[in-house]
Amino acid sequence: MRVLVLALVGLLAVAATQVAAAPVSNIRMTKHNLSKDGGQTVRANATPTAGQSTTDQICVFCHTPHAASSGKSPLWNRATSAASTYTGYTSLSMDADGGAFQTDNTKGRPAGASLLCLSCHDGTIALGNLNVLNGRTPVIIDMVGGTADDKMPTGSGTTTGFTRVIGADLSNDHPISVTYNNALASADKELRPMNASQQHPISGQIGSILGIRSPGYKPLLPLAPTGTAGAGQVQCSTCHDPHLYDSADPNRKFLRANRLQVTAPTGGAFSEANDIICLACHDKMGTEWSNSAHANTSTASYAYTGAATTQRQFAAGTPVWKAACLNCHDTHTVAGARRLLREGTTSTATPKAGGKSAIEETCYQCHTAYNATTPPNVLTQSGTLTATTGVPNIKSEFGRPVRMPIKDADQGGGGNTTEVHDISDADFSETREKLGLLDKKNRHVECTDCHNPHRVIRNTKIDGSGVTTQRTHVAGGSAGSYTVESDGNVASGVLRGAWGVEPVDALLNGITDWPEAPTNYEVKKGVTGTGTARSSTWLTREYQLCFKCHSTYSNTAGSFPTLGHTGGTPSGTNGMTTYTNVAAEFAVNATDPPSTGTDQGEKGEGSNSPEDSASIEPIGSYPGNATTSNMTATTNVNHRSWHPVRWPTGRSRDERRMQATGGNFRAPFGTRVGTQTMHCSDCHGNATSWTQGTGPKLDQVQGPHGSEDYFLLKGSWSSSTSISSPGFCGNCHNPSASSGSGDDYAGSSGFNNSGEDGGGGHGNEHGGKACVKCHVAVPHGWRNKAFLVNLNCVGREAGATYTGCMNFSDNSATVAPYYQGATLRVKTWPASGNWSANKCGKGSSTARDWMRSVCDN
């Protein structure tokens, strides 16, 4: 009988060498051949020590026709694991039953074939400890190549997912003993439902890709009937067949389907011939994954270097799109990592060895500096990031002096074992509490807070339109005619599939109400269609992403985190000690595009306002308040102002009294004045990522990852920022621009060079004066026009001490943050182009003399 079996195995081996197109059942050629003649590193000792045995048999290490372990099929020749309990994989986004091992849970152990595999792979039982051999029981076969006590060796890839001892802690291993059915697929949204009409390509039998085997029914990936009432469960044997041998791929890992992607993914039905095995279950919303930057062959074309392929056991030159899921995930990953992330820990070893969870380390495998002269690098790519080449170096961005708080020391205010942020579904949603609503120590970031790696695309716009090779946004919107909801601050493709919030703004009740806090937030998540309408249920605007952290969505009103807690900007910078409610600062009820061509900030100002509407505010500070002064279209017109992040301002060139061309806006914001919008990341990010007069640089990383300047700005902003030294404001504004004629304050910039009373030049006079003397120190949005402060009317925005409309007694405000360094007092608010010195001043003082004496201090 044994001779016949060996002869058949030999014939199979010959067949395998002749037909290498597909794996075959040939255990003799695999690492599971532990016989003394197997030729594997781990095998029976041909010259065993005294009292122990050897064998040339193959099947006996798992099976026996007699004296098999009771209740363990098929005819198991080993004891089950000595481990009394196992720790299973679990996560907040896992919808399957798992972790507690609901079957055989009296022992806290997985069930079925998984438990049998672990009788070797958990490292608790010697490989040669068998129930029976040649009629003798029990038997200890002397082994070589294992541990000192003949147990499963750790292997060369213990920390990187190579075949190895798995242990009893399965929290870093793919879930097993979990029920898989269509109800689970529906709840998860990214799992493939079972389809009984699919045909098995090899056997020709009718069956689904997933299912419980029965006579005449052989699905590609068999589920085990080990669940409640015989429900089908995922076990080790669902993905692995321990008998399989693939002469063309020695690193196949006994997988029943491809370890890597073979051809470009289509997002359609699972293809056994072409798709990576993971896609059999995890369809990742079909084309959302196949079109993503990590799967699309046109964007994920960079190849792994030789050293990187060796470490990962990929074929030489494997491109990113072929590695597919295995770029980021490892089904048996390093201990300490979450979500099966490859290299996702704080370990400094290469490859990783233990450590605490660090999601960003997985991303840094590829998104790091490329060094052409000092390999190894993970990917072979151009050393320069351009519109078409290079992988963005995000790791270096987070190494800048001011950065988003992503490092281990930022977790929980001192380095929690596990990151507090943790996604809860396929849309990467997180609770408000985990973002920091109740505990400021939760204020840190993970890459997955802003990016969904399964859906991210390289297009300029989130809907896939725009340039397909650019990895930045359309700053300010493209030139030409404006199309509602389709340009400007539409999020770029790198944010596709991320989630955020749209504030539901409160209406102002009076002049003391700025800033009005949103009354509610609409959560924007998922990708259920195309298009970029702000009203979409999915995220379409960059600010929606930012507002989920920089608002009362994840912060208690009046109790925002202290500046300097994380990120590198010290408390007290520009007089700021805490973060502010940015969503409230930008709050305004407006339209996109503007309903008319004039200033949207004037709406709701009273019966004399050119755009009267009681439903659209805001009201500015005295004396531009309709209840206190009689306003007309050209005098006493105060109103709200905001950078056009959420809404365009409506302030056209005519409204601003600007020239038809040129003016104080630099490109790309000078072509669509009044209707254009912008991104948060136009101001926040690395200064080298922006070219003055052009806009975003395609050869630099975009986004607020890190900066050399406080507040993550693209340039400095401080009490010394002025016309002469405009800092980051000068990226978009040209404060020295002039119309060449007009009164003291006329001209495209507000400061012309025609001279004050015929000489000197107002722009020259103010060239060295700090912007904050006249403009609000936190220039998101403001209660007055043109971000102008007014010490004649200070409200609750200056703190609890100041309510209503109070006259600030000092000549230089130190009330942080908005009035930091302010000196301006406004008597009358005129329309653009109608300013003159007597509009400003304190009491009955001569305005010009008073302003000079104060500003020179």
Image (tube, helix red, strand yellow):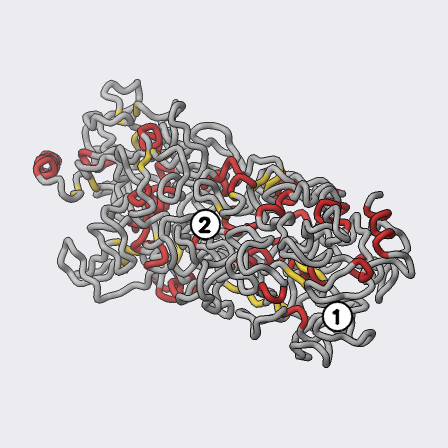
Answer with left or right where residue 690 lies relative to residue 576. left
Answer with left or right where residue 631 lies relative to residue 482. right
- Residue drawn at (83%, 54%) of the image: 848
Answer with left or right where residue 768 lies relative to residue 89. right
**Closest to the observer: 52 or 799?**
799
Residue 185 location, quadrant: bottom left
* Residue depth check, mark 1 versus mark 2: number of the one nearer the observer: 1
The residue wearing badge 1 is 635
Image coordinates for residue 376, horizontal then vertical, percent: 38, 27
Q: Is residue 450 above or below residue 650?
A: above
Between disc 1 and disc 2, whose residue precedes? 2
**Closest to the observer: 779 or 692?**
692
How far apart in space, not on screen, are marks 1 and 2 (Cα)?
42 Å
Residue farthest to the bottom, as pictured: 607
Q: Quadrant of the C terminus?
A: top right
Rendered image: mark on residue 472: 2
Residue 285 location, quadrant: bottom left
Image coordinates for residue 665, horizontal then vertical, percent: 57, 53
Answer with left or right where residue 182 lies relative to residue 356. left
The crowd level at tag 1 (other Cα within 10 Å; few <14, some 14-19, many 20+) is: some
Residue farthest to the front, as pictured: 758
SS at circle 1: loop
